[in-house]
């Protein structure tokens, strides 16, 4: 089953001489359970693609279907709820809440969802797996970049999302922690039947994924993008 269908996606930022054509007709599908690496040079359009799939920004043209829902057809409220229930994000800049401690940052997406109870046992498990349990009462500013990165990952996994979008989740981690985080992602993906799209500059990590989607200058390069292989 296809969990994600991206069709002829175009994104143009700005107007006139400031115009940037960040995505130029990107089409691909992703089956449920796939672990996909998205690679490409800086400025090629990777974060733009992730933001559009996550419904954080809207495409100029083209469509995105997640679990058969055209996300452009959802109202703002519906999109918020849909995102909360189906998508986990790890951003390039972590975007943790400075006024909340580690534990509350991780529990935050679940707290927002009034229809769901907080699974404290699961959050404890996540924090322990990521080596953050001892830091649970610390605030983001008291953590290193790598620790903040791991908090952001725990937060993205707290809702057990069907689709995890991770923009360089191992970018600030040393090689040992990178291996641990990758192990956790694989375990989580298997246990909760998750699909993962992960931007990475790490060639070894990319090679270890089920499929690599390479983006250059807003377009998918070569094979791998048509969903047929
Ligand atoms: N909000 C924005 N307004 C205007 N231009 C933007 C905006 N966001 C991205 N761009 C431009 O769109 C292009 C693609 O940017 P994007 O952030 O998607 O690249 P990237 O592949 O994620 O790069 P990196 O590996 O450095 O994170 C770049 O030329 C960038 O300058
Ligand atoms: Mg980026």
Image (cartoon, rainbow, N blue to C red):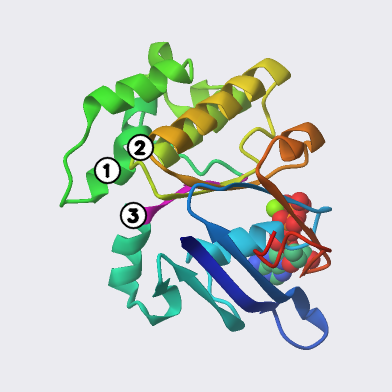
Does residue 14 appear left or right of residue 151 in this picture?
right
Q: Earlier in the sequence, mark 1 or mark 2?
A: 1
Queried on whether the Cβ of the residue with tag 3 lies below 8 angstroms from ligand 2, the answer reads: no
Does residue 226 appear left or right of residue 41 in this picture?
left
Does residue 227 appear left or right of residue 95 in this picture?
right
Considering only vertical position in the picture, is 124 above or below 59? above
Tell me the tag on residue 110: 1
Q: Is residue 169 visible?
A: yes
| Badge 1 vs badge 2, beta-carbon distance below 8 Å | yes
**x and y percent of residue 138 in the render?**
41, 20
Q: Which residues are magenta?
A: 86-92
Is 64 contained in the magenta span?
no
Q: Write down the residue under mark 3.
A: 84
Tell me the tag on residue 62: none
Q: Earlier in the sequence, mark 3 or mark 2?
A: 3
**x and y percent of residue 110 in the render?**
27, 43
From mark 3 to mark 2, how far is it between C-alphas?
Answer: 10 Å
Quadrant holding the C terminus: bottom right
Mark 1 lies on a secondary structure that is helix
- The residue under the point 40% across, 16% down is 128
Q: Earlier in the sequence, mark 3 or mark 1?
A: 3
From mark 1 to mark 2, how far is it between C-alphas?
Answer: 7 Å
- The residue under the point 72% across, 20% down is 175
**How many numbered circles are shown?**
3
Q: Write down the residue under mark 2.
A: 158
Mark 3 lies on a secondary structure that is helix
Label 3 crowd (10 A; few <14 / some 14-19 / many >=20): some
From mark 3 to mark 1, how far is it between C-alphas?
Answer: 8 Å
């Amino acid at each position: 089953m296809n969990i994600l269908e991206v069709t002829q996606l175009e994104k143009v930022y700005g107007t006139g001489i400031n115009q940037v054509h960040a995505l130029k007709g990107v089409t691909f599908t992703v089956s449920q359970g796939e672990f996909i690496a998205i690679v490409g040079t800086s400025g090629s359009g990777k974060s733009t693609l992730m933001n559009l799939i996550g419904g954080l920004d809207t495409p100029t043209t083209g469509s995105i279907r997640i679990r058969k829902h055209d996300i452009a057809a959802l109202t703002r409220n519906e999109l918020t709820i849909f995102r909360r229930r189906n998508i986990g994000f790890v951003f390039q800049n972590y975007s943790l809440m400075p006024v909340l401690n580690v534990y509350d940052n991780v529990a935050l997406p679940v707290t927002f969802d009034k229809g769901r109870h907080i699974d404290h046992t699961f959050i404890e498990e996540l924090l322990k797996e990521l080596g953050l349990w001892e830091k649970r009462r610390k605030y983001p500013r008291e953590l290193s970049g790598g620790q903040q990165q791991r908090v952001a990952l725990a937060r993205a996994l707290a809702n057990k999302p069907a689709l995890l979008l991770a923009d360089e989740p191992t970018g600030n981690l040393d090689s040992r922690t990178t291996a641990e985080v990758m192990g956790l992602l694989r375990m989580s993906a298997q246990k909760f039947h998750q699909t993962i799209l992960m931007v990475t500059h790490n060639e070894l990590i990319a090679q270890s994924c089920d499929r690599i989607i390479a983006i250059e200058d807003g377009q998918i390069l070569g094979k791998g993008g048509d969903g047929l292989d």
